[in-house]
Image (cartoon, rainbow, N blue to C red):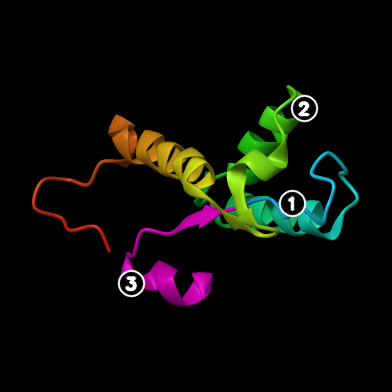
Amino acid sequence: MIEACLPTGTSVVLLTATPDARTDILDDASPLAQHCELVRGLAREYGLALVDPYTAFRQRVAAGDDVHAFLSQSNHPNEAGHEVVANLLFDWISTPAHKPEAGRALR
């Protein structure tokens, strides 16, 4: 999919996963953590933008927050979880280097 988008000039932003309560978010060896590392690797390999909700949630849990406070079910964010992701996306979009040129639509 990445290789199909790049020649078209489409802006590609990769996101890591949100947490899954069935997986220890602090365990680097978990399948979900490994999946997120693959996404990070693709961003590096292709020089793409990366928004990393998994790390943001991991930092919150490491600081003492309960992962369940961000989930409406085992693997889907609730309002607080969506707010974390939305804030990360907003921060990325708001960075001057990521704003589209005047007259150029975001795809």
How far apart in space, not on screen, are marks 1 and 3 (Cα)? 26 Å
First in sequence, mark 3 or 2: give its number. Answer: 3
Q: Is residue 17 visible?
A: no
Secondary element type, mark 2: helix
How far apart in space, not on screen, are marks 3 and 2 (Cα)? 40 Å
Residue that carries the numbered disc 3 in the rendered image: 8
Front residue of 12/86: it is: 86
Residue that carries the numbered disc 2 in the rendered image: 62
Query: Mark 3 or 2, which is nearer the eye?
Result: 2
Residue 52 at x, y percent in the picture? 58, 43
Whether 81 is drawn above or below 103: the answer is above
What residue sits 75% from the left and 24% below the top? 64
What residue sits 88% from the left and 43% below the top? 27
Residue 84 at x, y percent in the picture? 50, 39
How far apart in space, not on screen, are marks 1 and 2 (Cα)? 18 Å
Identify which amino acid the numbered label 1 is placed on.
Glu
Whether 86 is drawn above or below 21: the answer is above
Identify which amino acid the numbered label 3 is placed on.
Thr
